[in-house]
Image (spheres, rainbow, N blue to C red):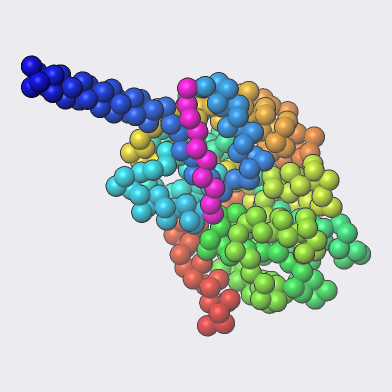
Amino acid sequence: MKNTIKLLLVSLLIVISIISCSNKKEENINNLVIYTPATRFFIDRLVKDFKEQNPDINVEIIIAGTAEIIKRIDAEKNDPLGDIFFTANENILKYNSNLFEEYVSTNADNIYDDYRSKEKYITGFMLSPSVIIVNTNLIKDIKIEGYNDLLNPALKGQIAFNDPTTSSSSFEQLVNMLYVMGNGNPENGWDYVAKLYANLDGKLLSSSSAVYKGVADSEYAVGLTYESAAVNYINTGSPISIVYMKEGVLIKPHSMAIIKNAKNLENAKKFVDYMTSYNTQKVINDELFTRAIVKNIEGSKMHIPLENINDIKEDEVVVDKNKDAWLEKFKNIVTGS
C-alpha cells in the first residue's frame, strides 16, 4: 500500500512538473525582447500601443548603444536572447547580415519606393536626415548654415560629435560630410574631416545621445546628430534649432531587423508589421515628431518638407566597400598616426 502511495505521489509530481514546464514554454512563446538604442520617450510610447493591441505579449526593452547591441547579438548567435534589433541604419544591418532573419513586412508596398530596402531582412520604419543642431542660447551671432561654418575658430571645443566607430548616426554624418565636402567624391572630403576634428579640440563623445543632450543642456553650442532626436528636444522646450546643411543632407531610413533564430519569431514579425502600419506611422509622425516612411501621410508640423531639403544620395556600393577603411582613416586622424 505504501509503495502504491509513493508511486502515486511520484506520478503526481511528474505531472505537475510537466504542466509547469509546459506553462513556461507557453510564457516564452508570448515574449518579445527588443534590443534598441532608441530613447525611452520614443520606444515606450510605441511599445505601450503595441501591448494594447497584443495584450498577451510580454515585451522587454533592452537599451544600449548600436555597437554594443551588435556585439551582443553576435555573442548570443547560438542561443539568441533578443528577438529584434530596433533602430539602426541600413548599412549597419547590411554589414552584419548573417545575424538577421529574412522577413518582408505585410506593409512593404506602402513604404516610399526610394526608402524601401532591397534586403529582405531589413525594414525601414522612419526617415531621419542628418542635421546640425544649434543651442540658441549659446550660438550668439555665429552663423551656422552648413558644414563649412563648423570650422569657425570661435566654435573650437564647442562642437558635439561622437565616435563614428560606435554609432550608426555618427557614421551617417561622416559619410554625409565626405560626399558633400568632397563634391561627390568621398576621398576628397578627408581634408575637411581633419579640420573639423581639430576644431573639436579633442572632444569626441562616446554616444549619439551625448550629442543632443550636450547641446540641449548647453554644454555645447552645436552638434552633429539626426533630425528626430533634435525635434523631440524642441518639442519639450529646449533651446534648440535645426540646420539642414546647405552643402547637402543625407536622408536615410532608420530600420529594424529580426534576429536570426529568434525564440519569439512570430511576435517579432507582429512588431515589424505594427511599426509599418498606417496607424503607427501616424503616431510616429504626429506624436513622436519623426518622419513617416509610408506614403500618404502629411508631414509633421515640426518638420520642413522633404522637398525643401538639399538632399543627396550616397553610392551604397562605395560605402559598403569602404566602411572599414574610412573608420580606420578616421581613427588615424584622431590618434595623429
Residue 270, position as x, y percentages in the image? 47, 26
**Residue 235 in sight:** yes
Q: Nearer the viewer, residue 289 or 190?
A: 289
Q: Is residue 228 magenta?
A: no
Query: Which contiguous range is marked in magenta?
Result: 56-65
Residue at screen point 80% across, 43% down: 236
Q: Is residue 215 left or right of residue 261?
A: right
Q: Is residue 205 left or right of residue 82?
A: right
Q: Nearer the viewer, residue 261 or 92?
A: 261
Number of numbered markers: 0
Residue 9, position as x, y percentages in the image? 18, 22
Residue 315, position as x, y percentages in the image? 53, 53
Question: Does residue 140 sit above or below 292 in this rendering?
Answer: below
Residue at screen point 66% across, 64% down: 161
Residue 37, position as x, y percentages in the image? 56, 48
Q: Nearer the viewer, residue 98 or 192?
A: 98
